[in-house]
Image (spheres, rainbow, N blue to C red):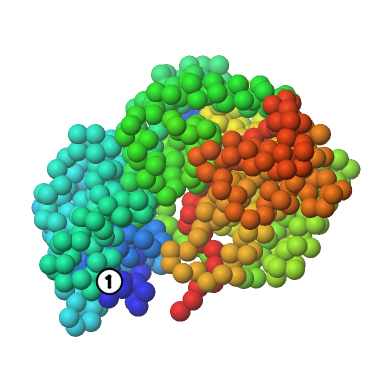
């Protein structure tokens, strides 16, 4: 049996009502556009146990079955299946119409609320048809968990064909989660693999649970391989150690990591309003960050780490100084020194356990305000974003991060004939606008040849922008605009037309994927409130944004290559697990090192592109197996270019140009925000 390939059901939905008292619902605004006096709305704190409890319940019906090992592996390898948890103000329990809309696509399971709201919750549950009676936060424990698992398994059992074995055993109840982002993932996977409850003890460190998840995933993959070979029990027992050792080198899982720490700028602005002090800044919420990471890691039985107190002001200041220097006119040598300074400031985070977790990861989802991908792992010579794909979700403010993480997951797919819309916001008279229009026209021609619809629309106001996107309804939206970073207000956004500034809140609903072709729309040094993060609130699943002002020509090459690779992948069969846009972006980012070089020194650029004697150095560089290592990408790319130069008798000149004036590593200055791994690419085959 292969779960959800042959049959599917609506996802279970757990509703957690936040006890905010009798105030009207509109008074509850956990998503904010301006900094708060802390990162978390403490009115939500009493409901956190409800979120944790929901994470202990089945995230889909298949978890109530005694699955074969192949079925367990499918659960771990397929697209994310995170719990669907609706975190709502308890005042909304009085709005039956809204609750009905909320649960329409789901299998509503239970409402978890404060004791004072149980009567209202019972009324809603009876009217809408929730499977379980509402439960109060005070009643949640191992006994209630056992009862709820048993009741759900019983109710769902009638939908299974004959011969399917139901398993109603609940996992071990744990609250609080004690700064451990892997313990729920570990216990849920152990349960599916047949380990008795209580087998998995509390870990001594967050890394121990993460290592446990990896161990079980490796063991699972080894057992499935042996089962697929038809090995007898005796033969499997004998071969298992060897196959496990082989799988140690092959098995990779997602790593979700939370890194706490806030820039000094954000703290100062968050504690002062209109000149009056609002109290001490508070970011002491490890339980919230544990829930964020646990929700993500439990979705695909992957590793999760909650690292508290690892980021300090010096690290954010180093990032801010890099962003400031780049905005003023970057010099390659100075940029290298500033990146080295960031590495030195962050050296303390590289424990042996953290390094091991990263080396065993397929990609990183980072809940942090810090651009982790700029750091270089000990032993590497290129930054982390070259080693593996990284996506980011801001945790300022933390309430918004929790709400966005718990929002029901949406899986999207880029397939043949997908639509791209460029909304050009730069006036025609602007020299950057002239260059961007030329670039979009060239890309449009290439996309048309690939069977991709590529439209360009010009707008001069947020209202026109909103109407254009609503009318065109693209799969991918490219916002071509000037960016702005107002350091006084600590905000970053775009300019539409001559002077209309926008943080994205006035641009209407967003499609699944947005590319911000604009300068420094997501700076991180000051904990900036940015359009990149706020577009996620507007419905985007993934936003490609930038830390610093980017070169218009380099950006056009980067975006063009990304779209080209997407178009190629969209025509290929999507054999599970299929590639995501994050995977494809990582390929582009790696190859873009040559673009960094060609937009560097004018002499180097001229030499790389020269075709006087036949193929250019660029064409030779891109041809054949390049042998470049991800962990040493820039060093290997330079070595490859020098080898080409040596064959052409230009080795010494090229070495000199690479040393001085050098080039800017602009491909490192992009951030993928949100959930880009939830957007898959390719044709779905039966």
Q: Work out whether residue 50 or residue 329 is closer to the camera in this orientation and state it.
A: 329
> Label 1: which residue?
228
Residue at 81%, 57% (x, y): give it: 441
**Quarter of the rendering containing residue 488:** top right
Query: In this rendering, does residue 94 appear at all?
Result: no
Query: In this rendering, does residue 604 appear at all?
Result: yes
- On the rendered structure, is 632 left or right of 663? left
Looking at the picture, how far across and down is residue 232, in whole percent?
Answer: 16, 72
**Quarter of the rendering containing residue 8:** bottom left
Q: Quadrant of the N terminus?
A: bottom left
Residue at 73%, 27% (x, y): give it: 656
Q: Work out whether residue 683 or residue 128 is closer to the camera in this orientation and state it.
A: 683
Looking at the picture, how far across and down is residue 135, in whole percent?
Answer: 20, 53
Looking at the picture, how far across and down is residue 144, in whole percent?
Answer: 14, 54
User: Above or below — where is 508 with respect to 660?
Assistant: below
- On the rendered structure, is 134 left or right of 430? left
- On the rendered structure, is 109 left or right of 256? left
Residue at 46%, 79% (x, y): give it: 686
Q: Secondary structure at mark 1?
A: helix
Looking at the picture, how far across and down is residue 608, in whole percent?
Answer: 77, 42
Q: Bin the neighbour count of mark 1 within 10 Å (Cα to Cα): few under 14, some 14-19, many 20 and up.
A: few
Q: Work out whether residue 162 or residue 330 is closer to the camera in this orientation and state it.
A: 330
**Quarter of the rendering containing residue 59:** bottom left
Residue at 55%, 23% (x, y): give it: 340
| Count of numbered circles on the image | 1
- Extreme residue toward the right, this view: 429
């Amino acid at each position: 049996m292969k779960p959800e390939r042959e049959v599917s059901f609506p996802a279970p939905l757990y509703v957690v009502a936040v006890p905010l008292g009798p105030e009207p619902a509109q008074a509850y605004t956990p998503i904010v556009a301006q900094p708060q006096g802390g990162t978390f709305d403490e009115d939500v704190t009493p409901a956190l146990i409800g979120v944790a409890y929901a994470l202990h319940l089945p995230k889909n019906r298949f978890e109530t079955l005694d699955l074969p090992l192949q079925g367990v592996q499918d659960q771990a390898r397929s697209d994310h299946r995170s719990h669907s948890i609706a975190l709502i103000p308890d005042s909304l329990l009085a709005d039956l119409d809204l609750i009905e809309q909320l649960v329409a696509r789901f299998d509503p399971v239970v409402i978890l609320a404060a004791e004072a709201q149980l009567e209202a919750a019972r009324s809603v549950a009876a009217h809408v048809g929730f499977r379980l009676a509402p439960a109060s936060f005070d009643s949640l424990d191992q006994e209630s968990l056992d009862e709820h698992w048993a009741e759900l398994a019983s109710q769902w059992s009638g939908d299974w064909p004959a011969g399917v074995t139901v398993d109603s055993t609940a996992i071990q109840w744990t609250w609080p989660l004690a700064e451990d982002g892997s313990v729920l993932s570990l216990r849920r996977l152990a349960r599916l693999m047949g380990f008795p409850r209580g087998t998995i003890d509390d870990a001594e460190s967050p890394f121990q649970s993460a290592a446990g998840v990896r161990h079980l995933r490796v063991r699972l993959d080894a057992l499935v391989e042996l089962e697929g070979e038809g090995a007898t029990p005796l033969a499997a027992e004998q071969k298992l150690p060897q196959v496990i050792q082989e799988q140690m080198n092959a098995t990779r899982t997602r790593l979700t990591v939370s890194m706490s720490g806030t820039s000094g700028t954000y703290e100062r602005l968050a504690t002062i309003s209109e000149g009056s002090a609002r109290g001490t800044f508070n970011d002491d919420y490890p339980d919230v960050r544990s829930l964020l990471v646990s929700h993500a890691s439990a979705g695909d039985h992957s590793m999760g780490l909650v690292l508290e107190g690892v980021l300090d002001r010096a690290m954010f200041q180093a990032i801010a100084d890099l962003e400031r220097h780049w905005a003023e006119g970057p010099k390659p040598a100075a940029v290298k020194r500033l990146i080295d300074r960031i590495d030195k400031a962050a050296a303390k985070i590289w424990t042996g356990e953290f390094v091991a977790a990263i080396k065993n990861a397929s990609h990183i989802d980072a809940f942090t305000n810090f651009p982790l991908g700029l750091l270089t792992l000990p032993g590497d010579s290129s930054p982390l974003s070259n080693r593996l794909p990284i996506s980011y979700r801001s945790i300022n403010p933390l309430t918004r991060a929790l709400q966005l993480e718990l929002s029901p997951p949406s899986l999207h797919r880029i397939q043949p004939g997908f639509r791209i819309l460029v909304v050009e916001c730069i006036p025609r008279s602007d020299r950057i606008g002239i260059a961007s229009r030329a670039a979009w026209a060239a890309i449009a021609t290439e996309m048309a040849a690939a069977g991709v619809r590529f439209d360009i629309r010009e707008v001069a106001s947020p209202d026109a922008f909103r109407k254009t996107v609503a009318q065109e309804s693209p799969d991918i939206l490219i916002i071509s605009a000037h960016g702005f970073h107002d350091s006084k207000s600590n905000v970053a956004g775009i300019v539409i037309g001559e002077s209309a500034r926008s943080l994205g809140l006035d641009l209407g609903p967003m499609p699944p994927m947005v590319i911000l072709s604009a300068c420094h729309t997501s700076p991180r040094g000051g904990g900036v409130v940015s359009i990149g993060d706020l577009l996620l609130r507007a419905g985007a699943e993934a936003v490609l944004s930038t830390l610093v002002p980017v070169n218009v020509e380099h950006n056009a090459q980067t975006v063009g290559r990304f779209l080209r690779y997407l178009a190629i992948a969209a025509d290929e069969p999507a054999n599970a697990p299929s590639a995501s846009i994050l995977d494809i972006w990582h390929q582009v980012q790696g190859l873009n090192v040559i673009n960094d070089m060609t937009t560097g020194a004018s002499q180097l650029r001229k030499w790389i592109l020269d075709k006087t004697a036949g193929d250019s150095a660029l064409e030779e560089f891109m041809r054949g197996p390049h042998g470049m290592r991800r962990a040493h990408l820039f060093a290997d790319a330079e070595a490859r270019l020098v080898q080409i130069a040596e064959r052409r008798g230009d080795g010494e000149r090229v070495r000199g140009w690479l040393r001085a004036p050098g080039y800017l590593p602009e491909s490192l200055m992009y951030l993928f925000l949100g959930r880009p791994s939830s957007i898959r690419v390719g044709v779905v085959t039966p």
